[in-house]
């Protein structure tokens, strides 16, 4: 059935927001008291596409999909467009790569790949709620080849990644981006299979306004087989991304964005491990005590513990690597980890072609969806297929809507999928007639029940192609508290703030 996406896809998604308030001068018992707040539409959104280009034989795109929300439905005025501009520092006037003006409609543009530059995606007003953006590149050498997609993420105080290596031929690029007008300062922590790493130049790293800093994992931790990274901003906020490129001498062996992992917790789920290729689980226990981890695979027929691998011990401060391909078999799975100490994780997948070069991809621990989540730049045709790997993180059946979008933003196909408890289902995504990209939006019937990864797989004349991208629901609303001052004069507190 066909209907406008701007009305069909909006649901409230609660996230925290920090409000700036005027300081009150008075004795120590003067305080600011929070009152019960309310959900209101996001009014400003920023995301960063961290690294698009740098390979002469490549085709690269950035795509923007504003899902829209209550603000766009209530306003009759033309919304202020979403603007995508390169991060070139404050000394250079930024040009505009593309502008998106319609809620629910994908806008994409090809990017010049001669230079490696990040892009800031900014929305103010009606198109800020539910802002989603994605970058995609198909590279064909000579330095690296493969299919690499990545979600453009919002600046934050903290980021975690489990992936990459410092070994010869495996280069990881940690990209720190600052889309704001003020300088940012970050600290980077590194762990490997032996423990925490005292890496050089990882403290008080300055990231200039509208600029980027790139750190190489092989310089931070030379020779490490498996690496995990934490980025913490002590001043300002940054977006962070980790790109890995592998080679054997002059032969490229694949390229991938390592998706950002959730912060360490006692239960995490890695969604969307495909039923093919070499699959290796990596688990980080960053704390001071060993983590005893119960490992379950959420397969097509329900959950099961791999024989001999159902309980793992991750030494404190290390990254443990566990092959899971034989246990998973030829079906997609999600990986559930329950631990007595906080952990986070990712899975590295390597596909090989019969007479060609290999390709690699990562999926990482991701929070269950709490609202509609888009996958923007999917591909179909020319040897590539796109599918969704949907995992149910609970014991009861879970339901989700999968909507494929036409070029004008209407819903080309709308299907309901039911996933049994503790299981993973695969859903094919077809390219609608007239559309350039296989764009889908997944909406859980109940928040917190499913995790989803988009898989793009195929071949070209040189070998295998593979990409994995966990889905994340963009913020649509924010929780705005009511604030009142308790003045030392004995007067009654002020009423609700005006909006």
Image (cartoon, helix red, strand yellow):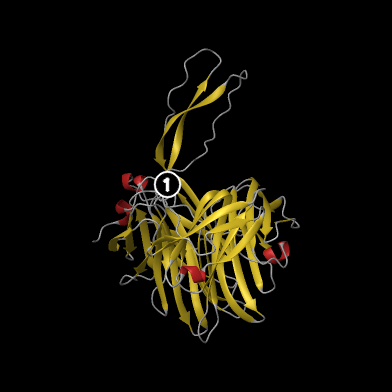
In this view, the residue farthest toward the bottom is: 355
The x and y percentages for residue 232 are: 63, 49
> Residue at (71%, 63%) from the top-left corner?
221
Q: Nearer the viewer, residue 172 or 329?
A: 329
For the question of whether residue 89 can be seen, the reply is: no
Left or right: 242 as drawn, with respect to 392:
right
Query: Could you tell me residue 142's position as x and y percent?
Result: 60, 81
Query: Quick one: quadrant of the C terminus?
Result: top left
Examine the rendered structure and indicate whether residue 273 appears above or below residue 499: below
When the figure is inspected, residue 327 is found, relative to residue 159, above or below; the finding is below
Quadrant of the image for the N terminus?
bottom left
Front residue of 480/391: it is 391
303, 263: nearer the viewer: 303
Q: In this view, does 114 lie to the left or right of 123?
A: right
Left or right? Give the position of 239 relative to 9: right
Write down the residue under mark 1.
125
Query: Can residue 283 be spotted in the picture?
Result: yes
Q: Residues within 10 Å of mark 1 (few under 14, many from 20)?
A: some
* Element under disc 1: loop
Q: Where is residue 214 in the image (x, y as percent from the top left)?
A: 66, 61
In the rendered structure, the answer to whether residue 26 lies left or right of residue 387 reads: right
Q: Which residue is drawn at 47% across and 68% down?
A: 328
Q: Which residue lies furthest to the left in this view?
A: 1
Residue sitting at x 55%, y 65%: 257
In the orientation shown, which residue stands out farthest toward the top? 490
């Amino acid at each position: 059935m066909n209907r406008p996406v701007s009305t069909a896809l909006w649901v409230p998604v609660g996230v925290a927001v920090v409000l700036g308030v005027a300081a009150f001068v008075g004795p120590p018992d003067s305080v600011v008291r929070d009152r019960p707040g309310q959900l209101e539409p996001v009014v400003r959104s920023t995301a960063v596409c961290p690294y698009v280009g740098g390979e002469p034989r490549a085709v690269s795109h950035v795509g923007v999909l504003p899902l829209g929300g209550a603000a766009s439905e209530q306003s009759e005025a033309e919304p202020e467009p979403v603007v995508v501009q390169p991060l070139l520092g404050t000394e250079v006037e930024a040009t505009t790569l593309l502008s998106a003006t319609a809620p629910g409609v994908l806008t994409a543009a090809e990017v010049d790949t001669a230079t490696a530059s990040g892009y800031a995606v900014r929305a103010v007003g009606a198109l800020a709620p539910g802002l989603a953006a994605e970058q995609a590149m198909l590279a064909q050498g000579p330095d690296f080849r493969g299919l690499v997609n990545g979600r453009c993420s919002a600046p934050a105080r903290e980021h975690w990644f489990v992936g990459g290596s410092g070994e010869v031929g495996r280069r990881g690029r940690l990209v720190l981006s600052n889309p704001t007008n003020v300088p940012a300062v970050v600290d980077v922590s590194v762990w490997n299979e032996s423990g925490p790493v005292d890496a050089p130049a990882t403290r008080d790293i300055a990231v200039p306004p509208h600029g980027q800093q790139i750190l190489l994992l092989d310089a931070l931790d030379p020779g490490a087989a498996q690496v995990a990274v934490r980025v913490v901003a002590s001043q300002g906020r940054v977006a962070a991304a980790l790109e890995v490129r592998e080679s054997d001498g002059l032969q490229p062996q694949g390229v991938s964005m390592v998706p950002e992992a959730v912060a360490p917790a006692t239960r995490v789920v890695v969604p969307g491990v495909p039923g093919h290729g070499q699959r290796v689980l990596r688990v980080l226990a960053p704390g001071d005590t060993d983590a005893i981890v119960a490992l379950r695979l959420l397969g097509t027929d329900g959950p099961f513990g791999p024989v001999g691998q159902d309980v793992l011990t991750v030494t404190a401060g290390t990254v443990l690597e566990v092959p899971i391909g034989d246990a998973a078999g030829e079906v997609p799975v999600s990986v559930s980890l329950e631990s007595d100490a906080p952990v986070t994780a990712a899975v590295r997948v390597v596909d090989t072609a019969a007479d060609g070069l290999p390709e690699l991809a990562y999926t990482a621990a991701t929070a269950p969806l709490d609202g509609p989540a888009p996958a923007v730049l999917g591909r179909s045709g020319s040897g590539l297929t796109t599918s969704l790997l949907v995992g149910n993180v609970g014991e009861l059946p879970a339901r989700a809507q999968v909507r494929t979008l036409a070029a004008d933003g209407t819903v080309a196909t709308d299907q309901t999928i039911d996933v049994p408890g503790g299981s993973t289902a695969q859903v094919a995504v077809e390219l609608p007639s007239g559309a350039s990209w296989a764009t889908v939006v997944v909406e859980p019937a109940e928040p917190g029940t499913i995790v989803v990864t988009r898989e793009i797989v195929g071949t070209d004349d040189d070998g295998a192609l593979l990409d994995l991208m966990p889905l994340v629901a963009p913020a649509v609303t924010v929780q705005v508290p009511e604030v009142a001052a308790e003045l030392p004069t004995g007067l009654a507190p002020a009423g609700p703030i005006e909006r």
